[in-house]
Amino acid sequence: MSYMRGDLLTKTRKLVKGLAKPAPAWLKAMEQAPPVTFPRTDGKIEKIELPEDVYVKRFFRRHPDSLYHDAIKISGFDPPPARVFAWRVLELKEQGVNEDDAMAVADDGVWSREKSKEASIQGTETNCTQRRKATTSKSISKRYQRNTGRGKEVC
């Protein structure tokens, strides 16, 4: 019966009514408490729209170079700049700020956040370079470096 359309109850009823099959013992119980029928879909899946999607699209129109930011990072905790921008615009609009002003303020906030991230990364790279230079001095012999691993990169 898996190739036929409909559920088990209606198929069994039709077979019993047409005298093609004797009534099974479970038919009365199933008629009193029929199984749940799930609504059928038309095959069309509705697109999920979030309130901030409008502002994300505007952000990408303004800044097409930021499209390279991966929206789904498995190991990342920071949302992409476009989402941060959209959330900030919605937050400012809830506070009663004009939409254009909210977008300008949010845009400044996103780019200042990105610049501070870049500065912290560059600062970390500078610290690593300084540590590398300090640990690999000429006074340490190559054998000592090999045994202890001090000559290798620290960062």
Image: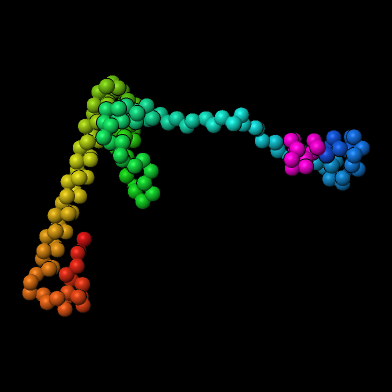
Left or right of 41: which side holds 145? left
Q: Is residue 45 visible?
A: yes
Please identify the quadrant where the C terminus is shown. Answer: bottom left
Relative image position of residue 84 (x, y in whole percent):
31, 36
For this orientation, the residue located farthest to the front is: 3
Along the viewing direction, whichever of 21 and 30 lies nearer the viewer? 21
Q: Main secondary structure of the magenta part?
A: loop
Residue 50 in magenta? no
Relative image position of residue 137 (x, y in whole percent):
9, 69
Along the viewing direction, whichever of 100 and 62 lies nearer the viewer? 62
Please tell me which residue is depicted at 34% across the width and 42% down the height of the picture.
70
Relative image position of residue 61 (x, y in whole percent):
30, 27
Q: Relative to 71, say whether 153 is above or below.
A: below
Q: How is the image coloured?
A: rainbow
Please tell me which residue is depicted at 31% across the width and 36% down the height of the picture.
67
Find the magenta span and give its range. Answer: 1-11
Residue 7 in magenta? yes
Relative image position of residue 76 (x, y in whole percent):
34, 48
